């Protein structure tokens, strides 16, 4: 049984090259295993992305919400959710 749904896994597979070269996964199962290993987080909104980074102690001064959502480790799932993969 997978820890992440297909939409999240596909978003990662399609965009993983932003963070990793070469790619770390080729299949949904490999993506799920990798994301589980690195304890990737799925949040339900852009506001939750900001809250996540604030909780992690990231200094967000001078960063707009758009810049944060465009960060390499933030993947838009496409349904309003975001996957955060800290490398």
Image (tube, helix red, strand yellow):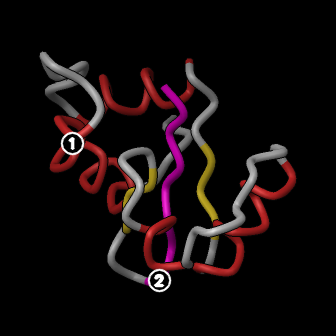
Q: Where's residue 12, x and y in %?
A: 30, 46
| Rendered view: 3 above or below 69 | above
Marks 1,2: beta carbons within 8 A: no
Asked which secondary structure carries label 2, the reply is loop
Using residue 12 as the reference point, say whether residue 66 is left or right of it.
right
- The quadrant in which residue 38 appears is top right
Q: Residue at x 50, y 47 (%)?
A: 4
Q: Residue at x 33, y 62 (%)?
A: 7
* In front of the other: 3 or 84: 84
Vertical side of 16 occupied by 46: above or below: below
Question: Image quadrant of residue 78?
Answer: bottom left
* Cα distance between the residues tagged 1 and 2: 18 Å
> In which quarter of the view is residue 39 placed?
top right
Q: Position of residue 16 (x, y in %)?
A: 24, 38
Residue occupying image coordinates x 78% and y 67%? 51
- Asked if the stretch drawn in magenta spans residue 76, the answer is no
In-image side of 8 versus 40 (left or right) = left
Residue 73, how many percent across, how many down? 44, 45
Horizontal arrangement in the rendering, residue 19 relative to residue 55 (left or right): left
Q: Find the magenta span and give its range.
A: 80-87
Q: Is residue 44 left or right of residue 54?
A: left
Residue 80: assigned label: 2
Which of the two residues, 59 or 55, is positioned nearer the viewer here?
59
Disc 2 crowd rating (10 Å Cα; few below 14, some 14-19, many 20+) is few
Q: Name the residue beneath numbered marker 1.
A: 13
The reply to whether the magenta stretch includes residue 82 is yes
Q: Secondary structure at mark 1?
A: helix
Residue at the (16%, 22%) spot, across then down: 23
């Amino acid at each position: 049984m997978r820890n992440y749904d297909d939409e999240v896994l596909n978003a990662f597979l399609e965009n993983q090259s932003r963070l990793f070269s070469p790619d770390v996964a080729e299949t949904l199962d490999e993506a799920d295993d990798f994301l589980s290993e690195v304890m990737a987080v799925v949040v339900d909104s852009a506001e939750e992305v900001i809250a996540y980074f604030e909780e992690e102690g990231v200094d967000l001064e001078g960063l707009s919400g758009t810049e944060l959502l465009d960060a390499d480790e933030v993947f838009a799932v496409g349904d309003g959710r975001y996957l955060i993969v800290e490398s």
